[in-house]
Amino acid sequence: MASFSSSLRGGRKRKFKSEINVVPYIDVMLVLLIIFMVVPPANSPSVINLPSAEKSALPPDDYIQIVLKPDASLSIGINGKNSAAAEQLADRAAVMRRLRALHAEHPAYPVMIAGDRESKYDDVIQLISEAKKMGINRVGLATK
């Protein structure tokens, strides 16, 4: 009888699968990935609000100042006790020639660059870079 009862049950014992089906989880992750790639970020990286700085130290008494206006016009002059009127110059090359001459006359004077809020950041960085290439070690930014 033992052989008869085993033939009714199929003769084999059933094995249970103990594996997790991960295909639905992969589908959910791909949908989330697509959603995060398609939805644009909330803030626009093209708009940058520049911070205003507090006065951390008093500026030097005498310094060479380069003023950059929003229309890309430049003026250069010496500010301080014996300050003369700033010269409006037509282009960047003329400003660099005048800066070289002023630095030769007053090698101890630092250079302050006053860029307007509406002026291009790249123009200010180029002015700093060109002043450093001339050998001027003390180049700063004027803040309001």
Image: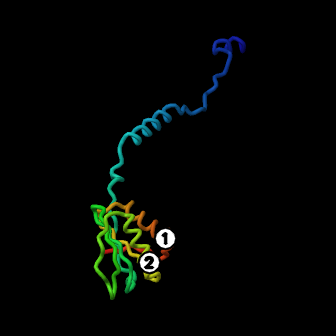
Nearest the viewer among 51 and 136 is 136
| Side (left or right) of 43 relative to 137 | left
Where is the C terminus found, in terms of image quarters? bottom left
For marks 2 and 1, the one nearer the N-term is: 2
Nearest the viewer among 111 and 38 is 111
Residue depicted at x 72% and y 12%: 3
Within the image, what quadrant is residue 21 found in?
top right
Marks 2 & 1, CB-CB < 8 Å contact: yes
Q: Which mark is residue 49?
A: none
Residue under label 2, please give it.
103
For disc 1, the neighbor class at 10 Å (few under 14, some 14 to 19, many from 20) is: few
| Side (left or right) of 21 relative to 89 | right
Residue depicted at x 40% and y 83%: 57
**Amino acid identity at mark 1:** Met
Within the image, what quadrant is residue 4 found in?
top right
Residue under label 1, please give it.
134
Image location (x, y in percent) of residue 96: 41, 68
> In the rendered image of this protein, does residue 28 appear above or below residue 113?
above
- Return the residue found at the far bottom: 81
- Secondary element at tag 1: loop
Image location (x, y in percent) of residue 102: 41, 77
| Side (left or right) of 15 relative to 37 | right
Image location (x, y in percent) of residue 142: 35, 74
